[in-house]
Each structure stands twice: as C-alpha cells, then as structure tokens.
Amino acid sequence: MAARALFSLSLSLGILISLCSADWNILNSQRTRNGVKISLKNYCEGWRMNVELHNIREFEVVPEECVDYVGKYMRSTQYLVDSERAVEECMVYLSTSCSLKRDGRDAWIFDIDDTLLSTVPYFKKHQGEKLNATSLEEWMSKAKAPALEHSLNLFNEIKAKGIQIILVSSRRNTSDLPPLTTLSMWGFHGWSSLVLSYKAEVREKLVSGGYRIWGILGDQYSSIQGLPNAKRTFKLPNPLYYIS
C-alpha cells in the first residue's frame, strides 16, 4: 500500500514537472511576460523583426522553434508585400530625389543572392541548417534560383534612367558563371560590372573613380554598411541567414 502511494506521488510529481516545463516552453504553450501572453507566432515574429532591425546579429541558424514560421513567411504574401514596399520606396526616391547627371557616372548597386535571385527553394530543403556557402553555391550553379520580380522591375527602371548598374556578390570565385546565365534568363540584362565583394571598399573604388552611388539594394546589412555611403540604402527582408 505504501509502495503504491509512493508510486502515485512520484507519478503526480512527474506530471506536474512536465506541465510546468510545458508552460515555459514556447513550442508547446503560451508564456506570460509582464502580463502579456506570448504565442509561438508572436515570439517568432518578434525574432524576425529584430533581425530586420539589426538588433539580432551574427546568428548561425534560425531558432529551432521558429524554423517553420520563417519558412512560411518567406513563401507568404506578406514577404512579397514587404519586399515590394521596399522597392516602391526605391522608385519614389529615384523619381523625386536623384539629380542624375547622365554622364555615365550615375550608379546603383545591387546584391545578387536574395536581392535579384531567390534562394528560398534551396532553404526550403535545408530549413534549420547553418548556412553552407559551398552547398549553396553548388545549388546556385545549377541555375535553379528564380528571379525576384519586384527587384527585376526596379532593375529595369534604373537601367531605363541611364544609371550604371553594379552587381555585387559574396561568391568566392569568378568561375561561378551559371548564376549570371540565370540572371540573363530571367531578364536581368545590361549591368555595367560584377564585383565579387559587397564591402565598403567596393564603394570606395567606385567613388574614387568618379561614380555617384545613388543607391544600394541588398538583403544583408553587410552589403549596405560602411564608408563611403551611398546616398540612400534600401534593405529587403531576409531572416534566413546572416552574413557579416
């Protein structure tokens, strides 16, 4: 009888501990902070927003509990709306604030990956994994990355204004030609040059060469930070990975 009572007590304690753990596990329940209930969706949206605000930096992977949420966001209408709004702001800036000289020295910088071409199909198969540059570049070399239509529209608008388009990429070698074929296949034609870096020294060389960099569009803060600055910088959303 005593043994049965002891077993029942142990079982009850085990259940109680499990329930307490669940109460504090964002995967299984809601947490309360300062009187506000926080759902998994709230938690993950807060994480994503702070990535875009650059409060969260140098993360290696998306938090496990937010992998599904981030994946859904990147394939959602909201991602398209967020991206298109950034491009619309570029358009407004171009039409109202750029005093173009039209002397061949007006320039605009575009990143390639997740700015012109989407890596979402790759990360759909590699959700929750650390960024593997070799694996990603191998996938990109197969010319499977689709174009981001909103960026293509901006690209063509900038080209029509006679602005020199500079493409930049973090890829590590110039033999990675298939993605350039992919760019052409999707309608990205007429850029001036491709530079395998998007750090500040690229902008320094352009400015030293007499170029006026009216704007930069990228998906990573490392592509828009540093001196000399462009006159305006614009960032597309990307909570999938971080490049410093």
Image (cartoon, rainbow, N blue to C red):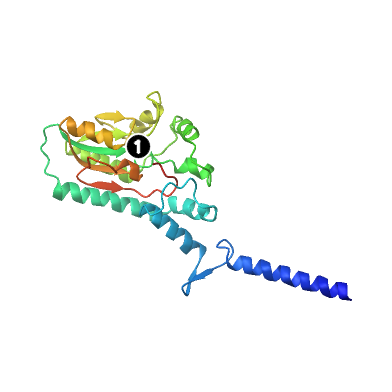
Q: Determine which quarter of the picture holds residue 169.
A: top left
> Which of these two is toward me, 75 or 198?
198
> Residue at left 49%, top 43%?
123
Mark 1 lies on residue: 112
Q: Is residue 188 left or right of residue 26?
A: left
What amino acid is labelled 1 in the image? Ile
> Residue at left 80%, top 73%?
8
Residue 173, horizontal then vertical, whole percent: 39, 26
Q: Residue furthest top?
A: 175
Within-10-Å neighbours for mark 1: few <14, some 14–19, many 20+: many
Image quadrant containing the N terminus? bottom right
Residue 1 drawn above or below residue 91: below
Q: Is residue 237 left or right of residue 160?
A: right
Q: Is residue 124 left or right of residue 49?
A: right
Residue 79, horizontal then vertical, whole percent: 39, 53
Residue 25, horizontal then vertical, whole percent: 58, 63
Q: Regarding mark 1 in the picture, which secondary structure is present there? A: loop
Residue 72, horizontal then vertical, whole percent: 48, 53
Q: Determine which quarter of the picture holds residue 100.
A: top left
Residue 65 drawn above or below residue 211: below
Q: Is residue 103 left or right of residue 244?
A: left
> Which of these two is toward me, 150 or 221?
221
> Which of these two is toward me, 29 or 202?
202
